[in-house]
Amino acid sequence: MTDFKINFNIFLQNAGFSEGNIYLIAALVFALVISFIYFIKFFGTFIFVSLEEKFKNGNFSIWLNLFEKIKPSIILFNGLFFACIFIPLNQIIDDIILKLYIIVSVVFAVDMIRAAIADSIKVYFTQRNNVSPEAIKNVINFSNVTSTMVLWLIVALFFLQFSQIDTKALISGLGIASIIVAFSFQKILSDIFAFFSIYVDKSFAVGDFIVFDKYSGTIKEIRIRTTKIKALSGHELIISNNQLINGVIENYNQLKKRRVSIEFLLPHNLNKKQLEKVMTEIKTLFEQEEFQKEAELVRANLNEITNYGHNIRVIYYFNQSNFLLHLDFKEKVNLAIIDLLNKNHITLVQMPLLQAKN
């Protein structure tokens, strides 16, 4: 910077400028730098606000937050630095100003990158509508700590390399230390990486009904290390994320349509007309608005004639993926069929145990 000042001052003197003109140029540079940065901030904010209002997907809020980080103090500091380039100062003061500017710029850049990573994670998980605010907060805190450590480590290595200090031994030491830390926190890190794997692979989400190992229940919350499940028995299960992704999961909510079959036995003493009436009334049942909007009847027929009675089978498609809603609707259908049979004074025949299991 000192060499630039000397050459610049010689150029001004040859051009007939006095020392007072140099300070005038510095003031002009100060005003131009501040105006330019303010213009960039205003223009960028205007563009991304317009895009966010148009698409409303949260993606452009990341850039808006970055522009908001350009505070007046940062703008003023840049203006002063570039103005000082043209003012003749002592070489020691020049070196101090340059080093201070580099330090402030590095701190600002690290803060911007860390904020961009945190905002990207927040937008990513918020758009999925299946992550609790507490889980998002934990992930952001984890990313802040991790990104800050990694970024400052990179800055330190670049600084040492720039200072012509041998960094090979340091890098080797850091590699060994990283292995020790990773080994010590292996279980915690595996659960954390499993958390990201769950959302990348979309194996399951909050509200899904799953069967895992000998457990079954509804996903209530996916946290950074564990997943909370509300079991059918009413108990609350907390299972590590790593254990979940390494096991076999049956997700009942992945089905867009669910095929449901209901079978029951009617007594032998029913004649053809009575059986046909039962089948017709069941079909009429599914034509009602409250049933029709949730399910699609495939067939209701006399499936077979057994030694125990007439086997009636009702098959329908339930049009929602939620397993618990399917159970509620199936119960509704069963109760409606029982009510229908009672009105016709028909008694169900008990299905043999072996046949019932099949």
Image (spheres, rainbow, N blue to C red):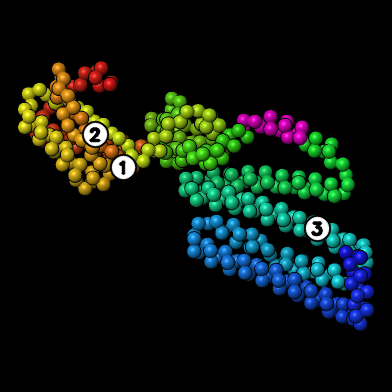
Q: Quadrant of the N terminus?
A: bottom right
* Residue carrying label 1: 319
Q: Which residues are magenta?
A: 175-188
Marks 2 and 1 close (CB-CB < 8 Å): no
- The reply, left or right, for residue 340 in relation to residue 187 is left
**Residue drawn at 61 percent across, 59 percent down:** 63
Tell which of 217 and 176 is nearer to you: 176
Q: Nearer the viewer, residue 73 or 173?
A: 173
Q: Residue at x 24, y 30 (%)?
A: 262
Please state if 45 lies on the left or on the right of 282 as rendered.
right
Rendered image quadrant of residue 188? top right
Residue count near mark 2 (Cα–Cα under 10 Å), binned few <14, some 14–19, many ≥20: some
Q: Amino acid at mark 1?
A: Asn
Image mark for residue 102: 3
Disc 2 versus disc 3: nearer the observer: 2
Mark 1 or mark 3: which comes first in sequence? 3
Q: Which of 133 and 9 lies nearest the eye of the viewer?
A: 9
In what quadrant of the picture does the C terminus appear? top left
Q: Residue 112, how many percent across, how many down?
A: 68, 56
- Residue at 89% x, 67% y is 4
In this rendering, does residue 328 appear at all?
no
Q: Secondary structure at mark 2?
A: strand
Which amino acid type corresponds to the residue marked 3 in the rendered image?
Answer: Ile
Q: Mark 2 — residue?
A: 315
**Element type where label 3 sits in the image:** helix
Instruction: Please report whichever mark, 2 or 3, sits nearer to the chain's N-terminal start.
Output: 3
The amino acid type found where label 2 is placed reads Ile
Horizontal relation, residue 240 to residue 259: left or right:
right
